[in-house]
Amino acid sequence: MSERIYLLPKEGNVYKANLHCHTIHSDGHLSPEEVKAAYREQGYQIVAITDHRHYQWHRQLCDQNFLALAAMEVDINEHFKRPGDFSRVKTYHINLYDALPEQFIEEKQGDLLPERRYNDTDYINEYIRKMKEYGFYACYNHPYWSLQNYDDYKNLRGFWGMEIYNYGCEHDGLYGFNPQSYDELLRQGNRLFCVATDDNHNQFPFGDPLCDSFGGFVMVKAECLSYEAVTRALLGGNFYSSMGPEIYNMSIKDGVLEIETSPVEKIYVMTSGRSCHKKVVSPGRELTQMSFPLNGTEEYIRVQIRDGQGRYACSNAYEMRGIVPVLREYDMTENG
Ligand SMILES: [Zn+2]
Ligand SMILES: [Zn+2]
């Protein structure tokens, strides 16, 4: 008998986070204080303010019930095909989250932005590596909105994660949900985490069907709500992504994967190949837990559930050595 391995830590508290958010410091419509008030009211404890090309730690927002992560969103645009027409320009959008907001303070007030070298993936990977020296870990954002395909992202290296869901892009009509890109990266060995985010700009008021807040979030399991503990949890992959449904537990014992969720219609376990483990019930019926015997050929597993309203939740991917999961942390060292 082997020990039970918990894919999400057994101990700790669960915190709700929006890791992609714009304010009046770029093209968002709310102040950081208004963002905090609105997200607090909806049960969030963590927001990363990721204004375009604008790094700032909104430290004044932090209190015992709320944590603001220091971050920014940078971009690398392709050269314009037609002058002034951004609508057909491919672009890399990258969120940089700061693990060390109290270090390199002077450097971080300088120019941290990447050069516009779209077709130079080596340059982009080197930029990500350099930003890591300052404490930043990078997320590859919304590939479809960026008009990007496999060729644009297959050679990216050193990223901490990618957006599997972006609620704002969903409203833009550009497929907020990116599970295919995530599997494509995983299948070629790029073991990154995945996040669901709002990317809220709040052009439309709360309650409007086009309001881009509260649709994509991450549930982080951490010891407490300190900057350090939450950063450790994010770097450790101790979280899952959701549009609504919840994953309460995922664990493996003796080659059996056990999953507990809020009521859903589908529980899928995606693998590196074509065969998934799955349990589905008819519309209107409910599943809240499932056990799947693993067969040792999965290579990686990631849990993906869907509720009756069509909303998904996704775990991170876990690399498998046979039927034993490898719990990997993101490596913040230079060459990791
Ligand atoms: Zn973006
Ligand atoms: Zn954004």
Image (cartoon, rainbow, N blue to C red):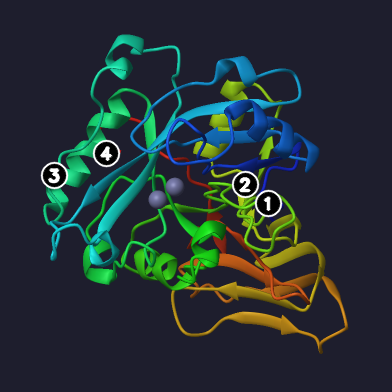
- Closer to the eye: label 4 or 2: 4
**Residue at image x 57%, y 59%?**
167
**Which tag, 3 or 4, sits closer to the chain's start?**
3
- Closer to the eye: label 3 or 1: 1
Residue type of the residue flagged with mark 3: Tyr
Residue 37 vs 173, above or below: the answer is above
Q: CA distance from mark 4 to mark 2?
A: 22 Å
Numbered mark located on residue 128 in the image: 4
What residue sits right under mark 2 in the picture?
Answer: 239
**Which tag, 2 or 1, sits closer to the chain's start?**
1
**Residue at image x 64%, y 20%?**
61
Q: Secondary structure at mark 4?
A: helix
Question: In the displayed structure, does residue 200 sit left or right of residue 289?
Answer: left
Residue type of the residue flagged with mark 4: Ile
Numbered mark located on residue 214 in the image: 1
Q: Secondary structure at mark 2?
A: strand
- Closer to the eye: label 2 or 3: 3
Q: Are marks 3 and 4 in contact (CB under 8 Å)?
A: no
What residue sits right under mark 3 in the picture?
Answer: 123
Q: Residues within 10 Å of mark 1 (few under 14, many from 20)?
A: many
Question: In the displayed structure, does residue 234 sit left or right of residue 124?
Answer: right
Q: Which one is in front, 245 or 318?
A: 245
Q: Which one is in front, 213 or 163?
A: 213
Q: CA distance from mark 2 to mark 3?
A: 30 Å
Numbered mark located on residue 44 in the image: none
- Closer to the eye: label 2 or 1: 1
How many marks the image carries: the answer is 4
x then y, percent, for residue 193: 48, 52
Q: CA distance from mark 4 to mark 1?
A: 29 Å
Q: CA distance from mark 3 to mark 4?
A: 9 Å
x then y, percent, for residue 179: 49, 69
